[in-house]
Image (cartoon, rainbow, N blue to C red):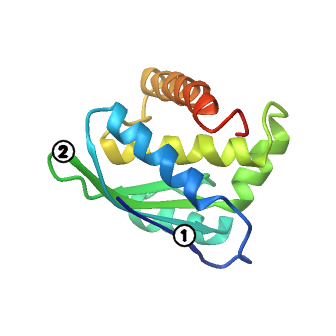
Amino acid sequence: MIFRVHFDDIEKIKINKKSLSEISRRVIEKEGFRPGNISVIITSDRILENINKRFLGKENLTDIVAFKDTAKETVNGEIYISYDRVKFNSIRYCKRNFKQELYRVIIHGILHLIGYNDSTVQERKQMIQMENSYLNELNLLIGGTA
């Protein structure tokens, strides 16, 4: 698996790329796919809002936009993450720290690359359940440091 992390329109932040890569690989393989080339772009609300509007026709703030290029069993794509939203949500929900929220968003993006959607209430519930399940499972994998 080729896993890249880029920073755009924000200062570079310290993150554990190896953990993000491992989380992505585990989710992909658990879902029955092979990991391919995945790029994660951590950016600002402003950039993500523009991407959301331009490519998805939505004019709201979001924490993530994913573009999949999944061919058969191999998962490839780009995940754009708003650092601002992840930071805000980690404080707002008081249930997890920044790192845990970033992990949740990475899992969410990987699930989108695999083909899961969250357009309906039922799909959103399923995604949240899957995120929680993977967070619990992967907390054990990474020694409970999520």
First in sequence: mark 1 or mark 2? 1
Secondary-structure class at tag 1: helix
Q: Please, is residue 10 above or below residue 78 in the view?
A: below
Q: Which mark is residue 50?
A: 1
Along the viewing direction, whichever of 122 and 58 lies nearer the viewer: 122
Mark 2 — residue?
73
The Cα atoms of the two marked residues, 1 and 2, are separated by 31 Å
Q: Is residue 71 left or right of residue 88?
A: left
Location of residue 140 (image quadrant): top right
Secondary-structure class at tag 2: loop
Residue 18 image point, x, y percent:
56, 57
Q: Residue at x 62, y 39 (%)?
A: 142
Q: Is residue 6 left or right of residue 70?
A: right
How many residues crowd mark 2 within 10 Å: few (<14), some (14–19), many (20+)?
Answer: some
Q: Residue at x 26, y 40 (%)?
A: 33
Along the viewing direction, whichever of 114 and 124 lies nearer the viewer: 114
Q: Residue at x 74, y 60 (%)?
A: 84
Mark 2: amino acid: Glu
How many residues crowd mark 1 within 10 Å: few (<14), some (14–19), many (20+)?
Answer: some
Residue 115 image point, x, y percent:
30, 40
